[in-house]
Image (tube, rainbow, N blue to C red):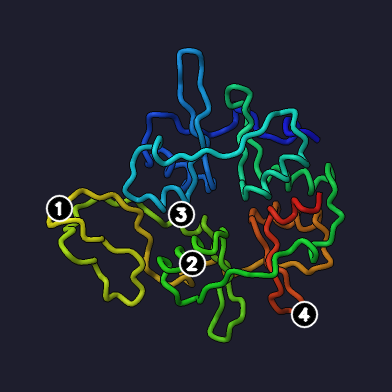
């Protein structure tokens, strides 16, 4: 298969245009659950592709409003590229969405598109997921404030955390999508003063650094402080190591999830992310 056989064509791709603001992107990220969105710039000759903006870009740059400053360059591909080659790029760059460009944006190919090809048998899906799973699992405690869990996910550089109970047993799953759905942008004024706000709060992970005795307008992403248990998915789908990549691809698609815990004898043994399945082809 080639990229053109699996990609979403430009007519169906949601984009944000320059000039624009973070609210333009946040609307789509929250309402549609996208991980990132292409950025284009209208011109007299049509439109030009400029970059990509992701959930992480919004959360990590809370005071930046302009899309031009928030977007970043990512690898691109062409319609004639083989699906195997673009899968290698996705793995090497940890890129979930790769814009398809021929001078202008003509489509987008996502990890889900490749997983769908695996599920349909269009590419090799016979590899057992035991050899594809990641054994290092990112976890968090069910009573951890969501603000802290978001930072844990960010530092682990993965889009999820398996939630553990008081006995250290798996009790749920928290994903970036769960967090972005309840995040909201707030505006206000902060006294920069000579101190850091709420610095004595046991769970505080961000404050306002001293830059002088004055007030200045701020814009931030506010994440609820309630425990992870309030926002996690409790009914966790799992798979065993003998399942093939094709079988697990179908599990991911039918449940609309990006990763699934690997269990061995009922115990957590690893995680199978959709991007892990790409190694099988």
Mark 1–mark 4 Cα distance, whole angstroms, equals 58 Å
First in sequence: mark 2 vs mark 1: 2
Q: Residues within 10 Å of mark 4 (few under 14, many from 20)?
A: few
First in sequence: mark 1 vs mark 3: 3
First in sequence: mark 1 vs mark 4: 1
In the picture as drawn, the residue positioned furthest to the left comes out as: 213
Task: Give the residue number, with chain letter if any, for mark 3.
Answer: 180
Q: Nearer the viewer, mark 3 or mark 2?
A: 2
Q: Position of residue 90 (x, y in %)?
A: 67, 46
Mark 4–mark 2 Cα distance, whole angstroms, equals 28 Å
The quarter of the rendered structure image containing the N terminus is top right
Mark 1–mark 3 Cα distance, whole angstroms, equals 28 Å
Position of residue 251 relative to residue 24, above or below, is: below
Find numbered disc 4 in the image and state the secondary structure of the residue it sits on. Answer: loop
In the picture as drawn, the residue positioned furthest to the front comes out as: 211
Task: Write the residue at 46% across / 63% down.
Answer: 150
Circle on res. 265? 4
Q: Is residue 200 left or right of residue 19?
A: left
Mark 3–mark 2 Cα distance, whole angstroms, equals 15 Å
First in sequence: mark 3 vs mark 2: 2
Task: Give the residue number, with chain letter if any, for mark 2.
Answer: 152
First in sequence: mark 4 vs mark 2: 2
Task: Write the residue at 57% across / 32% down.
Answer: 13
């Amino acid at each position: 298969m080639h990229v053109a056989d699996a990609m979403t064509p430009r007519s169906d791709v949601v984009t944000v245009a320059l000039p624009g603001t973070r609210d333009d992107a946040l609307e789509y990220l929250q309402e549609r659950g996208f991980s990132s969105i292409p950025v284009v710039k209208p011109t007299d000759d049509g439109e030009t592709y400029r970059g990509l903006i992701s959930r992480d870009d919004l959360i990590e740059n809370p005071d930046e409003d302009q899309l031009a400053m928030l977007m970043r360059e990512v690898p691109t591909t062409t319609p004639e590229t083989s699906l195997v080659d673009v899968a290698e790029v996705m793995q090497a760059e940890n890129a979930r969405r790769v814009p398809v460009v021929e001078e202008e944006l003509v489509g987008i190919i996502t990890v889900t598109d490749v997983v769908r090809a695996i599920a349909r048998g269009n590419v090799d899906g016979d590899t057992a997921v035991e050899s594809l799973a990641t054994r290092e699992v990112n976890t968090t405690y069910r009573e951890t404030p969501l603000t802290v869990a978001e930072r844990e996910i960010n530092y682990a550089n993965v889009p999820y955390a398996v939630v553990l109970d008081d006995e250290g047993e798996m009790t749920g799953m928290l994903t970036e999508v769960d967090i972005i759905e309840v995040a909201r942008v707030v505006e206000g004024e902060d006294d920069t003063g000579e101190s850091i706000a709420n610095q004595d709060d046991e769970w505080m992970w961000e404050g306002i650094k001293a830059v002088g005795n004055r007030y200045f307008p701020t814009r931030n992403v506010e994440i609820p402080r309630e425990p992870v248990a309030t926002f996690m998915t409790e009914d966790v789908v799992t798979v065993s190591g003998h399942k093939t990549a094709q079988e697990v691809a179908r599990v991911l698609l039918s449940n609309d999830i990006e990763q699934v815990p690997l269990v061995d004898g009922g115990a957590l043994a690893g995680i199978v992310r959709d991007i892990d399945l790409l190694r099988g082809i």
